[in-house]
Amino acid sequence: DRFSLQNLGDADIFDRYRTVDFFVATLQSYLPRELHEHLLRLELAEVLSYILSTHLEFLANLVPYYQDEEIIAIHAGLDITLPLDEQPDDVRLRKRPWELGLEHYPGPKWLAVGHTPTQQLEPTAFGKPLIQGRVLYMDTAPVSSGRLCALHLPSLQIICSD
């Protein structure tokens, strides 16, 4: 079994994923500060008691990617050899474009990805989205660049803060 938001209430799966960095940060954002250091010892029911039911419902209904006639939007990237619905979690959430060969992404849809700051792909792209082939790289490193960008759908217009 792998973790998904749909099986958030499964204690065994929760125990396997509770140490993963992105999950820890999310859970700690709900907990009182004095419980942050005790996260690994808390029971699932206690952790879930701090999360609003509307948030749990929202999380349980999230999809791992967005797709329409024009574009696929996914957090980190995709394995271009696998169908979209068979992408492993570590690829969708953590892999870098050079690990996935995204420079060879064949299309025909646009692919929008984040997770890798654009300057890691092109040093002059710091704080700017980057388009290479049919791939839109959207991570502008907003914490360090001060610039956050979003992709408006369905127009495919990139909008950035200044």
Image (tube, rainbow, N blue to C red):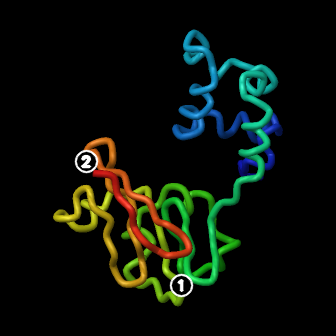
Residue nearer the viewer, 54 or 25 = 54
In the shown orientation, is residue 61 left or right of residue 107?
Answer: right
| Residue ID for mark 2 | 145
For label 2, count other residues whose C-alpha is less than 10 Å away and answer few (under 14), some (14-19) or many (20+).
few
Q: Residue at x 38, y 67 (%)?
A: 137
Whether residue 24 is situated above or below residue 7 in the rendered picture: above
Q: Which of 128/33 is in front?
A: 128
Residue lying at 79% horizontally and 37% vertically, measured from the top left: 12
Q: Please, what secondary structure does the residue beneath circle 1 have?
A: loop
The residue nearer to you, when weighing 103 against 118, is 118
Mark before the other along the chain sequence, 2 or 1: 1
State left or right for residue 22 relative to residue 159: right
Q: Whole-percent x and y of residue 139?
A: 38, 57
Q: Residue 26 appears at what percent x and percent y? A: 58, 34
The picture quadrant where one finds residue 27 is: top right
The residue at 27%/51% (across/down) is 162
What amino acid is found at the position of numbered circle 2 in the picture? Ser
Percent of width and height locating residue 85: 70, 72
Which residue carries the number 1 mark? Answer: 109
Q: Is residue 2 above or below residue 70?
A: above
Give the residue displayed 74% in from the left and 45% down from the top. 58
Per the model, the C-alpha gap separating discs 2 and 1 is 29 Å
Dot 1 crowding, Cα within 10 Å, few <14, some 14–19, many 20+: some
